[in-house]
């Protein structure tokens, strides 16, 4: 028969948002003389927005004291990795002044692990430790700059946010070398996932796009993928009904990795009715694709449309500008296409400052398709 502690922890894993169970668990721990009980109570008190500034200051002071005294124990098998100190760079190339990992506790549990910059290869050891770390049972956010292997684990089932690879600035060139075949199998074990950001390649996109467990997913960002993007698979996935943000920017390639046929399937999907942000870059969308966008009716729902590097000319710009629904957009990014000032002006009359149309290409540049190597490359 499970102990009261085991029963309370199992209930929290089942419903991490149940404040009553968190309070009961804190009371139980305090009765056992475990300082983590007080830590949970302090963090719960900090969630009370009616606390005075003086009360909050005292609570935050006590929170730091308890973490300093007991944090290593509460990290368990992850402690050595997560409490690493910066490594001196013998070549003086990288300036690393902070610990590589940002860790966050919420309600007494490890809630977030973030590794954003990775000049010294942190991350692979953590990916091997997590599947055996009971301390990760309520982990909600995991950001890894790199891995050797993603190992599925029921201990990570409460993840809400997962990112693999270093974040890319949308409007600057960036390099990336994260190869990970395990992405679909890993994501398949995350039933509560809400935000998935992949700055990586080497995995099967069709397998990822077809996963049936993505019923809570709101944001899907796929960058660097060196493979044809089977958006028709994504369009047919009825589990993606909650998706609001779809952000795509393929790896550099001789030919577009997002083609018009797959975009057409996406635009007419019966499941993606909650999309508000759509980014389709480095495609052969062209002027025909602009017609597809208008006739699909998706502009009635979108707030942001990003069509950078899409082979669109003035004809496509006029098609978009003539659609009454275009003015609903909060932003249209149509930079690095083939517009002249005539096409830009047609869109500007509708969108004004909400239009981003810088650095257009000539017809010759479009023919050479050098734009396919811009933005994300190795």
Image (tube, rainbow, N blue to C red):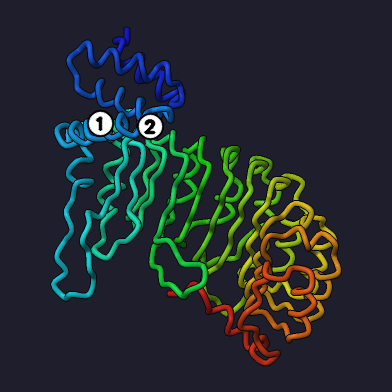
Q: Work out whether 36 lies above or below 126.
A: above
Using the rendered view, name the quadrant where residue 238 is placed.
top right
Q: Residue furthest bottom?
A: 364
The residues tagged by marks 1 and 2 sit, at their Cα atoms, a distance apart of 26 Å
- What residue is at 17 percent from the left and 31 percent from the top? 70
x and y, in percent, of residue 236 in the image: 70, 48
Whether residue 223 is visible, yes or no, is yes
* Secondary-structure class at tag 2: loop
Q: Is residue 168 found left or right of 54 in the rendered image?
A: right
Question: Quadrant of the image for the C terminus?
Answer: bottom left
- Sequence-wise, which precedes: disc 1 or disc 2? 1
Give the residue at x 55% y 76%: 253
Depth check, mark 1 against mark 2: the one in front is 1
Residue at horizontal 41%, vertical 18%?
Answer: 11
Query: Which residue is more in the foreground, 66 or 126?
Result: 66
Looking at the image, the residue that sits furthest to the top is 1
Which residue is more in the foreground, 104 or 10?
Answer: 104
Mark 1: secondary structure: helix
Image point (23%, 63%), residue name: 120
Q: Is residue 126 above or below residue 32?
A: below
Residue 95 percent coordinates (x, y): 22, 68
Relative depth, front residue between 237 and 302: 302
Q: Which residue is mark 2?
A: 138
Left or right: where 348 falls relative to 198: right
Q: Is residue 340 left or right of residue 16?
A: right
Dot 1: few (<14), some (14–19), or many (≥20) neighbours within 10 Å?
few
Of residues 287 and 211, the one drawn nearer to the viewer in this rendering? 287
The residue indicated by pointer 1 is: 58
């Amino acid at each position: 028969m499970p102990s009261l502690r085991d029963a309370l922890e199992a209930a929290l894993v089942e419903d991490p948002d149940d404040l009553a169970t968190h309070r009961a668990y804190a009371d139980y721990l305090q009765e056992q003389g475990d300082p983590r009980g007080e830590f949970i109570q302090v963090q719960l008190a900090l969630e009370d927005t009616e606390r005075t500034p003086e009360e909050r200051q005292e609570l935050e002071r006590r929170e730091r004291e308890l973490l300093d005294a007991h944090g290593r124990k509460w990290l368990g098998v992850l402690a050595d990795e997560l409490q690493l100190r910066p490594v001196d760079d013998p070549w003086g190339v990288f300036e690393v002044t902070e610990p590589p990992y940002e860790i966050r506790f919420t309600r007494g549990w490890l809630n977030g692990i973030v590794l954003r910059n990775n000049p010294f290869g942190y991350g692979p050891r953590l990916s091997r430790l997590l599947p055996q770390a009971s301390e990760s049972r309520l982990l909600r956010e995991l950001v890894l700059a790199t891995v050797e292997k993603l190992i599925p684990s029921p201990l990570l089932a409460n993840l809400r946010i997962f990112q693999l690879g270093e974040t890319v600035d949308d409007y600057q060139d960036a390099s990336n070398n994260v190869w990970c075949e395990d992405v679909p199998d890993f994501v398949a074990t995350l039933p509560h996932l809400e935000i998935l950001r992949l700055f990586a390649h080497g995995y099967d996109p069709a397998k990822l796009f077809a996963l049936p467990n993505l019923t809570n997913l709101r944001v899907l960002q796929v960058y660097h993928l060196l493979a044809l993007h089977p958006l028709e698979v994504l369009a047919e996935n009825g589990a993606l009904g909650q998706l609001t943000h779809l952000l795509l920017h393929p790896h550099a390639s001789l030919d577009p990795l997002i083609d018009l046929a797959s975009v057409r399937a996406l635009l007419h999907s019966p499941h993606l009715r909650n999309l508000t942000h759509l980014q389709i870059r480095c495609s052969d969308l062209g002027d025909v694709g602009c017609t597809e966008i208008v006739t699909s009716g998706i502009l009635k729902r979108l707030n942001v449309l990003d069509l950078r590097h899409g082979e669109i000319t003035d004809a496509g710009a006029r098609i978009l500008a003539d659609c009454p629904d275009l003015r609903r957009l909060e932003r249209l990014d149509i930079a690095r296409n083939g517009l002249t000032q005539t096409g830009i002006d047609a869109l500007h009359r509708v969108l004004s400052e909400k239009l981003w149309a810088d650095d257009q290409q000539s017809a010759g540049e479009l023919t050479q398709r050098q734009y396919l190597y811009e933005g994300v490359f190795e």
